[in-house]
Amino acid sequence: MKPRNKFQKEIAELSKQLPKITRTQIKWGYKHCVEHIGRRTAKGVISCFECGHSWTNKDMAIEECACPSCGMKLKIETTRKRTNSSYEYFCIITECKGYQVIRFFYIDYRAKVGEKAKYFHSEVIQRWIATNGKTIVMAKLRGLFGFYDTWQFCSSLEIRPDKSLYNAIPTCIYPRQKLIPEIKRSGYKGDFYELTPLDLFLYLLTENKAETLLKAGQTKSLKYFAYNQGYKNISNYWTPIKICIRNKYNINDVSLWCDYIDLLHFFGKDLHNAKYVCPADLNAEHDRYVEKKRAYIKQQQKEEDKKRALEDELLFQEMKSKFFGISFTDGQVQVRVLESVQEIMQEGDIMHHCVFTNDYHLKTDSLILSACIGEKRLETVEISLSKLQVIQSRGVCNKNTKYHNQIVGLVNKNMKQIKKRLVA
Ligand SMILES: [Zn+2]
């Protein structure tokens, strides 16, 4: 990509002025990024994958040793593998004209038993960071083919889109670093707390609270909020965080702690009070509040149901009151119209069917009646008001009783009572 704006043009120009990687730097990179292996056979012959030298050591227990020929510290592995290879990213942190620059060098390593290891390196990415947090990517062209990521080493370092393709997690970082003053005074001491250099530097430059966290040693919080930017806003937790810092309370499980603070906030607790925000046993306090919230939600639900029933009651009265008072009997079975939502709920509860939960009582076309002998409920009857017919009549758990036909017959015989109210 050709540089388009002033910022891009400036960086493209400055990039050309960066010094080449020195021999000392790349030697350090080869040594620290690559895992150097001594291949051991079952007979105790060790081959140095670094220089090709081999020797015998009968002590099969050793896990590490220095090569007697090249001096490289080797990790000893008993294996039949005759080759070893890997690729790594070596990172150099430097500064140029007020910009913080992170340079990534791709290292390709191939080794074969009995041969000197072959190394190759190429600078593939530069991340340029301005003090206001704006960044520019200079990189070689990269393509992904299947599992292989292939850099076009012959391509030039150019402005590239700011995508993960042009970011890398360094295997190791060169210890001598040049920092811009803004990073220097932020409290950064060379540790990245499992963040990438880019993520940490950007967070330190764009979030002034990051510096406070770093200087107060709240590094787990620093890592958490830098990592979860856009998802968890540190400002929402800043009051209790300041209380933690003042009380030298180290937040270890930041995710759990934030969750706990959300709960305190929900219950209107004082987030300036160390008694709440710095619990000795975070897990226990967190669980206690989770339980409290669960109980609260359950209570809410209950009240919600009650409210709904009350609202239903008004509607029900409006819709069905003209049928209230209807009841008839054949001398044995008695049938009557149910006259409130409360009654219908009870009927449903006792008969274990869904007459209430399915809102039959609010259907314009339905009328619900109950058939009993004395105190004993037999079946619940639903009538279609438009057809003046029994739609269903069901006993406990939706089963018919031996009175089923008798009940349906009795209702049909008295349908005129309902019809009369319908036209009235
Ligand atoms: Zn060696």
Image (cartoon, rainbow, N blue to C red):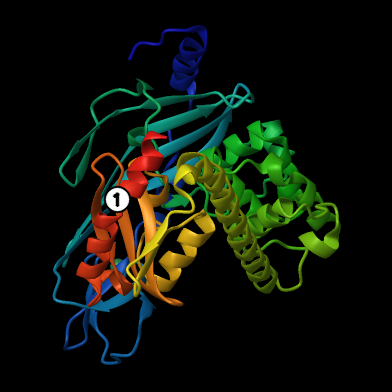
Image quadrant containing the N terminus: top left
User: Residue at image x 36%, y 47%?
Assistant: 418
Report which residue position mark 1 lands on. 415
Image quadrant containing the C terminus: top left
Q: In the figure, 328 relative to 239: above or below?
A: below
- The residue at label 1 has a CB less than 8 Å from ligand 1: no
> Residue 39, position in %: x, y?
23, 74
> Residue 15, position in %: x, y?
46, 21
Tell me which amino acid carries mark 1. Answer: Met
> In terms of depth relative to the viewer, which is nearer, 183 or 250?
250
User: Residue at image x 17%, y 87%?
Assistant: 42
> In terms of depth relative to the viewer, which is nearer, 303 or 332?
332
Image quadrant of ligand 1 equals: bottom left
In this picture, residue 52 sits left or right of residue 257: left
In this picture, residue 234 sits left or right of residue 314: right
> In terms of depth relative to the viewer, which is nearer, 352 or 61?
352
Q: Which quadrant of the figure has residue 59?
A: bottom left
> In terms of depth relative to the viewer, which is nearer, 206 or 124?
206
Q: Residue 68, can we see it? A: no
Q: Residues within 10 Å of mark 1 (few under 14, many from 20)?
A: some
In this picture, residue 120 sits left or right of residue 319: left
Q: Secondary structure at mark 1?
A: helix
